[in-house]
Image (tube, grey):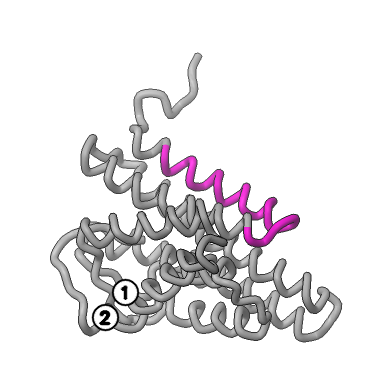
Amino acid sequence: MHPRFVGRLGVADAVTSANAALGFVAVVAATVDVELAARLVLLAAIADGLDGLLARRYGSTPAGEHLDSLADVASFGVAPAFIVAARVGDTWGFAAPRALLAVGICALFVAAGVVRLGMYTAYDTGNAHTEGVPTTLAATLLAAGVLAGVSDPLVVVAATGVLTVLMVTTITYPDLYPRDALAMGVVQAAALLAPLALSRSFPRALLAWALAYLLLAPRFYWRAEGKRS
C-alpha cells in the first residue's frame, strides 16, 4: 500500500506542495518575528516561480493547476494577511476597535485571494494574462514593505485594503517575460537573504519593482506567453 499521489504527481507538484508548507511556517513565524515571516513569504514566491519553470521543463499533471492555487491560498493569502494582523497586534493590541477593523480587512484579503485564485484556475489558466492583481504580487508587496521598514500599521492596513480590492477587479495584468521573472526572482532572493544590507536596499528595490508592475503593467507592459497566479 502506498500514498495515492505516487506516480500521479511530478517534481513541479512537489515544489508546489513545499510552497504551501512555507505558507504555514510563515504564519507560525509571524507570531515571533514578522520580518522572518516576510522573508518566508518571499521564499514561497520564489518556489511559486520555480514550479512553473519545472512544469514547463518536465511537464505538468492534471492536479498541478489545482495544487498551485491551493498552495497560493496558504502562502499568498493567509500568510501575508496574518503578517499584517501580527504587525497590528504588536502595535495596537487586538482589543482596540481599529485593530478589529484591521483584522476584518485581513480576512477580506484572504477571501479575495481565494476568489481571485478560483477565477484564475477556471478562466485564466493557459492565457498570457490574468484579471486582477496576482496574489503573488500582492503578497510580495506586503512582505517587501515589511522588510523595507514600513512599520506604520495604518499604512500597512491601508495597503492591504487596496490590494484586496485590486485582486478582484477586471484590470488585466500581462504575464512576465522569463527574463523579467528571473530578474525579479534574483531581487527577491537578495531581499530574502540580506534584508538589512545597504540600509535595506534589496527589500526597497523589490518594493519599488513590484509597485512599478502594479501601477504600470496593465497599460505599458504586454507579452504573449507565461504563467501568473
Residue 15 in which image quadrant: top left
| Secondary structure state at the residue bearing disc 1 | strand
Extreme residue in the front direction: 198
Residue at left 53%, top 63%? 77
Q: Amino acid at mark 2?
A: Pro
Q: Which mark is residue 218?
A: 2
Give the side of residue 62 with respect to residue 79, left or right.
left
Q: Which mark is residue 131?
A: 1
| Secondary structure state at the residue bearing disc 2 | helix
Residue 180, position as x, y percentages in the image: 25, 62
Residue 50, position as x, y percentages in the image: 34, 46
Q: Which residues are magenta?
A: 15-35
Name the N-terminal-most of marks 2 and 1.
1
Q: Amino acid at mark 1?
A: Glu
Q: Residues within 10 Å of mark 1 (few under 14, many from 20)?
A: many
Q: Nearer the viewer, residue 90 or 171?
A: 90
